[in-house]
Image (cartoon, rainbow, N blue to C red):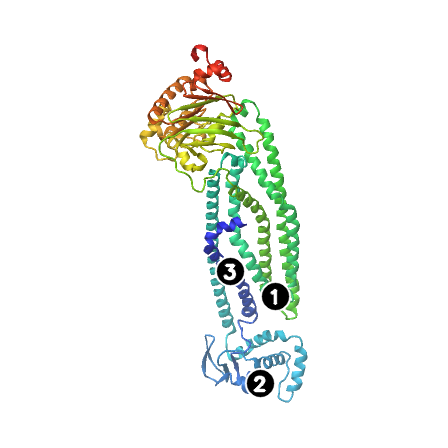
C-alpha cells in the first residue's frame, strides 16, 4: 500500500476534499431516516404536533390541568390570556376565539406542565371527574396506571394537544399538512445535497485514480525503457505487458474504491451504529447480524485470498503462450503443430478457468449470506420492535428509522466485504508493479559522467570477459582489440562464438564482467549512456520496424532533415523501396514491418543507423538478408561515407564476401579471439577462418 500512498501524495488536497464530501454525503443519507421517522410519528401519528407544551388551549382546559399542580403561577406566567372573539394567528392559521384562550408567549417547553398535562389526559381518557376535593386520590390512581410509562409522557402530551388545539379551533389537518410538507421539502433538499456531493466526490475519485494509473503506467514504461538485457531476463515480455495493462487497471479500480467505498463504509457504519444506540431495546439484533457477517468473511477469506496471486501468474503464462503462438504462427502451421499449441493453451486456460471459478464461487457465497442476514435482520426488527410498539416503548417511525440505520450498517459491511476481497487481489498487482519499479538497473550512469570529445577516437577492448547473469560459463574471455577512426573492424566465427555479444557491449546493452572498453581513452562506464548512444549508429541483428511510415522508422524520433534521410536511403540501397510505393517515404509500415520483406526491413533498419552522422556504426549481421549484388553496392557506398567522415565501422557477418575488404577481421571461437588481421593474412595463418572461407567461396573468389 506504500506504493499507492506514494502516488496519491501529490493529490492530498483532492483526497481531503473527497473525505469531506463523503462525510457530508453520509450525514445527508443518515439524516433522511430521522425525517422519515418524524413524518410517520409526528406528522401522521401526532397530527403534525411536535411540542409537548401546548401553544394554545382554552381557559377551561387550562383550569383542568392546573388542578394537578400546586404552582399555578409558574405555568400561567408563560401564557397570555386572550378573551373570546379576539383574533390571533397561530401556526399560520387565523383564529377567532369562541371562548377565553391561553397562548404560549415564547413557545418554549414548560417542564412544570408536563406531569399535570399527562394527569389531565389520563383522567379524560378514563372518564374520571376532576376536582380539588378528589385531586389527591385521583393522582394516586393515575400514578398506578402510569407506573413504568414515564418515557411515554411526551407522546401522551402530544396526543392530548390534538384535542386541546381542536377545542381552540385550530385545524389539525392544516398543522399536519404543513409539518409533512415542511419535512418533505427538507428531505428533498438533503437528498439533493447528498446526490450533488456524491457526484462531485465520485468524479474526483475517478479522476484521481485515472491520473495515478496514468502516472504509474508512465513510470513503469520509463523504467522498462531503462532496463538492460539483464533486467529483461527477469521479466518476460508477456509479464511486462500484463503488469502495465491488467495490473495497473486493477490498481486504478482499487484506488477508486478506496476513495469511495473504503472512506464511505466506515463513516457510514460508525455514524449509523451511533444512531442505532438510541434504541437500546433492540440494538442487540444488529450485533448478532454483524457477528454472522464477520464470521462469514473470515471463513471465505481463508479459501479465496491465496488464489488471487495464482490467477495473476496463470494470466502471465496465458499471455506468454498467446504471444509465442502469434509470433510463430507460420512456423506452427508449416510443421502442423496446431494441436500441440492448442493443448498447451487449453492446459493453462483450463487452470485459469478453474481457479477463477473457484474464487468467483467463494465470493458469490457472500451475496446470499448478506441477503439472508439483511432479510433476517428486517424480519427480526419488525418482530421485536412490534412488541416495543405494543407496550408504547417505541413508535412506528422509530422502528422504521432503526430499520434504515440497520440496513446502512449491513450495507457498510457489504462494502467492506467487497473491499476485503478486492484489496488482497489488487495488492498482488501492487506487488507486481512495485517489483518492476524497485528493480535496480545493473547498468547505471556514474554520478559525474565524463564528456566525450566531438571528434572520433580509438575504440579499445582491453582484456574483456563477459558472462551472462546467472550463467556458469563466460561467453567472452580475454578479448582485446582496437578500432581506429576510419577503420572497418569485422567479426566472424561460428554460431555462438560471441560475435553479437561483443557489439552489444559497445553501447552498454550489457556491461563487461571484467576488463574494460574505452573510447577516446575513456572507460565507457564513466560516460553517460545518452552521450554514448549519440555517438553510435546501430543496426540490430534482427531488423525491427515500428508502426508508422518509412520516414518515421528512419528518423525514429530524431530531428532528421529530408536530405539526410534520402542520403541514408541511398547508402542503404533502399531507393527502390521508396520508388515502388505511391506514398514514397510516407508509405505505411505495420507493426513489426509485416508488410515489407525481410530484405526491405533490413535495408530500412540500416538506413535508420545511417540517418545521422555518427562516430561509430555497428552492423550486427545486418547484411545477411541482402543478396550479393545489393550487399556489394551497399558496402561500396558505406566505404565512401567512411572515407569522408572517418567513422569507425564495427561489423558482424557470416559471409566472407561481406568482410574480406575490412581493415581488420577478428575471428572468434568459443568466446576467444583466435585470429586477427586482414583477409589475406588470415587465409594463411588462421585455420578457422580458412575453413569458413573455403566453405563459402572458391579459391578464385578468395583470391
Q: CA distance from mark 1 to mark 3?
A: 20 Å
Q: CA distance from mark 1 to mark 2?
A: 37 Å
Residue 235 to residue 69: above or below: above
Foreground residue among 241 and 322: 241
Q: Which residue is mark 2?
A: 66
- Position of the C terminus by quadrant: top left
Foreground residue among 278 and 702: 702
Residue 599 to residue 31: above or below: above
- Is residue 636 among the parts visible in the rendering? yes
- Tell me which label, 1 or 3, sits earlier in the chain: 3
- Is residue 199 among the parts visible in the rendering? no
Badge 3 density bin: few <14, some 14–19, many ≥20, Cα 10 Å: some
Where is residue 493? Give x, y as percent. Answer: 50, 21
Q: Nearer the viewer, mark 2 or mark 3?
A: 3
- Tell me which label, 2 or 3, sits earlier in the chain: 3
Where is residue 423? Give x, y as percent. Answer: 57, 49
Badge 1 density bin: few <14, some 14–19, many ≥20, Cα 10 Å: few
Amino acid at each position: 500500500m506504500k506504493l499507492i500512498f506514494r502516488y496519491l501524495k501529490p493529490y492530498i488536497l483532492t483526497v481531503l476534499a473527497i473525505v469531506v464530501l463523503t462525510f457530508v454525503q453520509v450525514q445527508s443519507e443518515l439524516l433522511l431516516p430521522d425525517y422519515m421517522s418524524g413524518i410517520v410519528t409526528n406528522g401522521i401519528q401526532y397530527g403534525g404536533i411536535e411540542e409537548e407544551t401546548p401553544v394554545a388551549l382554552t381557559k377551561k382546559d387550562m383550569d383542568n390541568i392546573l388542578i394537578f399542580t400546586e404552582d399555578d403561577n409558574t405555568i400561567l406566567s408563560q401564557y397570555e390570556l386572550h378573551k373570546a372573539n379576539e383574533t390571533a394567528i397561530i401556526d399560520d392559521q387565523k383564529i377567532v376565539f369562541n371562548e377565553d384562550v391561553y397562548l404560549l408567549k415564547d413557545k418554549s417547553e414548560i417542564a412544570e406542565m408536563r406531569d399535570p398535562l399527562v394527569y389531565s389526559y389520563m383522567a379524560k381518557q378514563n372518564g374520571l371527574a376532576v376536582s380539588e376535593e378528589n385531586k389527591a386520590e385521583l393522582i394516586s390512581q393515575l400514578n398506578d396506571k402510569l407506573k413504568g410509562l414515564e418515557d411515554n409522557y411526551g407522546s401522551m402530551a402530544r396526543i392530548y394537544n390534538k384535542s386541546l388545539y381542536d377545542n381552540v379551533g385550530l385545524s389539525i389537518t392544516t398543522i399536519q399538512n404543513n409539518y409533512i410538507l415542511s419535512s418533505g421539502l427538507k428531505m428533498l433538499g438533503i437528498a439533493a445535497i447528498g446526490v450533488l456531493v456524491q457526484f462531485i466526490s465520485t468524479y474526483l475519485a475517478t479522476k484521481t485514480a485515472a491520473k495515478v494509473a496514468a502516472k504509474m503506467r508512465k513510470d513503469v514504461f520509463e523504467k522498462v525503457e531503462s532496463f538492460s538485457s539483464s533486467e529483461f531476463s527477469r521479466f518476460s515480455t508477456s509479464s511486462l505487458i500484463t503488469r502495465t495493462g491488467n495490473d495497473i487497471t486493477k490498481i486504478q479500480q482499487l484506488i477508486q474504491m478506496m476513495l469511495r467505498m473504503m472512506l464511505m463504509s466506515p463513516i457510514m457504519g460508525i455514524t449509523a451504529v451511533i444512531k442505532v444506540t438510541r434504541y437500546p431495546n433492540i440494538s442487540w439484533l444488529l450485533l448478532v447480524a454483524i457477528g454472522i457477517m464477520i464470521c462469514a468473511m473470515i471463513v471465505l477469506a481463508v479459501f479465496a485470498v491465496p488464489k488471487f496471486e495464482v490467477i495473476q501468474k496463470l494470466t502471465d503464462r496465458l499471455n506468454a503462450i498467446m504471444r509465442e503462438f502469434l509470433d510463430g504462427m507460420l512456423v506452427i502451421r508449416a510443421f502442423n503443430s496446431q494441436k500441440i499449441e492448442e493443448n498447451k493453451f487449453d492446459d493453462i486456460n483450463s487452470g485459469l478457468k478453474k481457479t477463477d471459478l473457484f474464487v468467483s464461487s467463494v465470493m458469490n457465497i457472500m451475496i446470499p449470506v448478506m441477503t439472508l442476514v439483511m432479510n433476517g435482520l428486517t424480519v427480526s426488527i419488525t418482530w421485536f420492535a412490534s412488541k416495543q410498539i405494543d407496550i408504547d416503548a417505541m413508535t412506528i417511525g422509530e422502528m422504521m428509522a432503526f430499520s434504515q440505520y440497520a440496513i446502512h450498517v449491513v450495507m457498510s459491511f457489504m462494502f467492506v466485504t467487497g473491499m476485503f476481497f478486492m484489496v488482497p487481489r489488487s495488492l498482488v498487482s501492487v506487488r507486481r508493479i512495485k517489483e518492476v519499479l524497485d528493480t535496480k538497473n545493473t547498468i547505471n550512469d556514474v554520478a559525474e559522467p565524463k564528456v566525450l570529445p566531438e571528434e572520433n577516437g580509438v575504440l579499445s577492448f582491453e582484456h574483456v570477459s563477459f558472462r551472462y547473469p546467472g550463467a556458469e560459463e563466460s561467453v567472452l574471455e580475454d578479448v582485446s582489440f582496437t578500432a581506429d577512426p576510419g577503420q572497418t573492424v569485422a567479426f566472424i566465427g561460428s554460431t555462438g562464438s560471441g560475435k553479437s555479444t561483443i557489439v552489444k557491449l559497445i553501447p552498454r546493452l550489457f556491461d563487461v564482467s571484467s576488463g574494460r572498453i574505452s573510447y577516446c581513452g575513456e572507460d565507457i562506464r564513466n560516460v553517460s549512456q545518452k552521450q554514448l548512444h549519440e555517438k553510435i549508429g546501430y543496426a540490430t541483428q534482427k531488423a525491427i520496424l515500428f508502426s508508422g511510415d518509412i520516414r518515421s522508422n528512419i528518423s525514429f524520433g530524431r530531428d532528421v532533415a529530408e536530405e539526410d534521410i534520402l542520403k541514408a536511403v541511398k547508402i542503404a540501397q533502399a531507393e527502390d523501396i521508396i520508388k515502388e510505393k505511391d506514398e514514397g517515404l510516407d508509405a505505411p509500415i505495420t507493426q513489426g514491418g509485416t508488410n515489407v520483406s525481410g530484405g526491405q526491413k533490413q535495408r530500412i533498419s540500416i538506413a535508420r543507423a545511417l540517418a545521422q552522422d555518427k562516430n561509430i556504426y555497428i552492423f550486427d549481421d545486418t547484411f545477411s538478408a541482402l543478396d550479393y549484388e545489393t550487399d556489394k553496392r551497399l558496402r561500396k557506398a558505406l566505404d565512401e561515407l567512411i572515407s569522408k567522415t572517418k567513422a569507425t565501422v564495427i561489423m558482424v557477418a557470416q559471409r566472407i564476401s561481406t568482410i574480406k575488404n575490412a581493415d581488420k577481421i577478428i575471428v572468434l571461437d568459443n568466446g576467444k579471439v583466435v585470429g586477427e588481421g586482414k583477409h589475406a593474412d588470415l587465409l594463411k595463418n588462421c585455420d578457422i577462418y580458412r575453413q569458413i572461407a573455403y566453405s563459402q567461396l572458391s579459391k578464385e573468389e578468395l583470391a
